[in-house]
């Protein structure tokens, strides 16, 4: 098996792991990690030949962009305090605690290298948290905080990691320079993200064609990441800024085709890249195994201690942080979403799985210092990092569904249904207002006006039938059954039309482009 065949195996596994995971009740990223471990143990499977410095630029931009598309800037702003407590403060605390412990127990590990180890194992993986916790029916407030933490903690951790590695390589360190680098990195990233977001928004309006617009959204995350890194900014923060800008300002309510096709496209990208990323986590196991040859006992002991520090520090931090946030929340009424019970806090604690970023940063640790000496304890750092990733991802990822069920933590479906009803009413009222505006400038027949008025109400009814009174609800059900029958018959008619047009594609003298254009018209008609 060569590298290309291995890539296709991972892509196939990414697709298959989704239905298999749903059937088994297990997260697809965890299954892909297990698949990667199995492949790594097979002799005919080659070692992954991907330069470590390319793993983050290739995997993180599309994954982050896909994750941000499911949220909004308003949601982040409403949860800024809990997100900052997790994404910034907790990363610093975890890094410090791991660095102190690792420096004390690992012989020959200088403090700067220990800080680098702490920084690379500190951030929970945004993709793991979203993919695992987001499909368990958790309260939306928990998923929002986990998404925000996962998206922003990489920014803090990666900057700390680079500062620590630079100190270990050069042998010098300055707190003021490190703080200045952190601030400048954030400023450059935000500037790059906003500039690319604004430029992309303008360019998308010029392109017009949905295919070209979606292709542009695929390129933009990579461009944002690379440009920010070239300017010594945070590539992760730049991608987040660009994505949030586009989600907020580049959405045209009437651009139906681009929105439908874009959602489908990014769902595919998210599924494939996530699968490959976690497959690589498992495949890179051979690096850790090779490092441990000859002294398994010591390395396993060190890895177990660091895993314990990572897990316990998160719990020790979450308990007072949640209490503090709740106290502040009672003082000032905001839209902030926080855990409301100790059960939800425990679920948040157990959702802190490490993943792709930690593996990529561990593999990117330099081989040598500026003096030409081997990087201190590089092998030990790589092994401990893999230990943290595998234990948190497999143990926590596999047991999180059981823990959620055991604690009875469930989403507030009543609140979501009420919000859906409110949106349905707003949509129906907006349609009705627009109808009145049209009647003021156009002379509509009374029959047509009444028909359109009923349709304005049906717009909301189709979203949430509960907004109608009982008798009107029953009338709507009857119309819905009749409409369903009409659509079924029309669907069969359109299917016959598509079969006929598609058959013409293989006829002599038929122009495939014309056939495809007519077929696309029939496909769009089928969506109405």
Image (cartoon, rainbow, N blue to C red):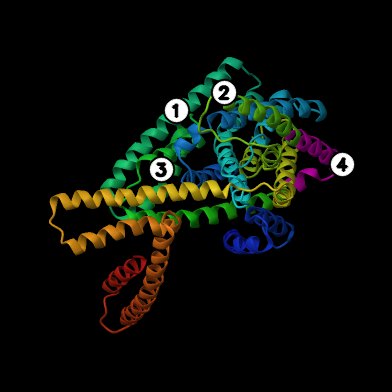
Q: Earlier in the sequence, mark 3 or mark 2?
A: 3
* Contact? badges 4 and 2 (CB < 8 Å): no
Point out residue 35 in the picture as x, y percentages from the top left corner: 68, 58
Write the residue at 62% across / 42% down: 125
Quadrant location, the C terminus? bottom left
Q: Spatial distance from mark 4 to mark 1, Cα to Cα?
A: 45 Å
- Look at mark 3 in the image and give the residue it sits on: 247
Residue 188 circle label: 1
Label placed on residue 331? 2
In the rendered image, which quarter is residue 3 located in?
Answer: bottom right
Which dot, 4 or 1, sits closer to the camera?
1
Image quadrant in which you'd find residue 43: bottom right
Secondary element at image label 1:
helix
**Is 294 in front, or is 404?**
404
Q: Which residues are magenta?
A: 288-310
Question: Which comes sooner in the sequence, label 3 or label 1?
Answer: 1
Q: Is residue 315 rendered to the left or right of residue 225?
A: right
Contact (Cβ within 8 Å) of mark 2 with mark 1: no
Q: Earlier in the sequence, mark 4 or mark 3?
A: 3
Please name the residue shown 35% across and 43% down the image.
250
How far apart are labels 4 and 2 at the CA level? 52 Å
Viewer-nearest of discs 4 and 2: 2
Residue matched to label 4: 297
Q: CA distance from mark 3 to mark 2?
A: 32 Å
Q: Is residue 372 visible?
A: no
Callout 3 secondary element: helix
């Amino acid at each position: 098996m060569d590298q290309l065949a291995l890539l296709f195996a991972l892509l196939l596994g990414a697709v298959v792991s989704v239905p298999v995971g749903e059937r088994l009740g297990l997260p697809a990223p965890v299954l892909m990690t297990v698949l990667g471990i199995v492949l790594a143990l097979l002799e005919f499977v080659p070692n992954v030949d991907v330069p470590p410095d390319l793993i983050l630029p290739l995997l993180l931009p599309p994954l982050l962009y896909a994750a941000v598309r499911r949220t909004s800037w308003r949601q982040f702003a409403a949860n800024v305090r809990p997100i900052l407590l997790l994404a910034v403060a907790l990363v610093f605390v975890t890094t410090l605690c791991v660095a102190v412990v690792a420096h004390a127990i690992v012989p020959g590990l200088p403090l700067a290298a220990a800080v680098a180890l702490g920084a690379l194992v500190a951030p929970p993986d945004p993709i793991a948290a979203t993919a695992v916790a987001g499909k368990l029916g958790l309260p939306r407030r928990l998923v929002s905080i986990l998404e925000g933490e996962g998206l922003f903690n990489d920014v803090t951790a990666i900057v700390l990691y680079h500062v620590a590695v630079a100190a270990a390589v050069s042998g010098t360190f300055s707190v003021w320079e490190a703080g200045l680098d952190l601030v400048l990195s954030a400023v450059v990233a935000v500037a790059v993200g906003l500039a690319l977001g604004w430029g992309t928004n303008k360019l998308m309006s010029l392109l017009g064609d949905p295919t070209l617009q979606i292709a542009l959204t695929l390129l933009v995350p990579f461009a944002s990441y690379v440009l920010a890194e070239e300017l010594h900014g945070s590539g992760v923060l730049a991608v987040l800024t660009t994505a949030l800008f586009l989600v907020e300002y580049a959405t045209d309510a009437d651009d139906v085709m681009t929105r439908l096709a874009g959602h489908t496209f990014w769902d595919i990208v998210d599924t494939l890249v996530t699968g490959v990323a976690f497959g690589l986590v498992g495949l890179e196991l051979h690096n850790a195994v090779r490092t441990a040859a000859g002294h398994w006992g010591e390395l396993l002991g060190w890895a177990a201690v660091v895993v314990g520090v990572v897990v316990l520090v998160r719990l020790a931090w979450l308990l007072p942080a949640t209490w503090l946030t709740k106290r502040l929340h009672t003082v000032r009424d905001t839209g902030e979403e926080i855990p409301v019970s100790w059960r939800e806090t425990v679920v948040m604690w157990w959702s802190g799985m490490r993943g792709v970023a930690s593996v990529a940063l561990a593999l990117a640790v330099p081989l040598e210092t500026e003096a030409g000496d081997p990087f201190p304890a590089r092998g030990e750092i790589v092994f401990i990092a893999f230990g943290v990733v595998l234990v948190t991802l497999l143990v926590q990822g596999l047991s999180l569904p059981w823990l959620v069920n055991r604690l009875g933590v469930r989403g507030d479906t009543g609140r979501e249904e009420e919000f859906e009803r409110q949106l349905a009413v707003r949509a129906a009222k907006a349609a009705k207002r627009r109808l009145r505006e049209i009647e003021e400038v156009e002379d509509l027949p009374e029959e047509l006006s009444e028909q359109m008025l009923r349709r304005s109400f049906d717009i909301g009814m189709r979203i949430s039938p509960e907004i109608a009174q009982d008798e009107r609800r029953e009338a709507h059900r009857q119309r819905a059954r009749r409409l369903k029958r009409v659509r079924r018959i029309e669907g069969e008619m359109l299917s016959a039309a598509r079969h006929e047009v598609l058959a013409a594609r293989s006829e002599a003298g038929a122009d495939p482009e014309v056939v495809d254009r007519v077929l696309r018209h029939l496909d769009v008609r089928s969506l109405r």
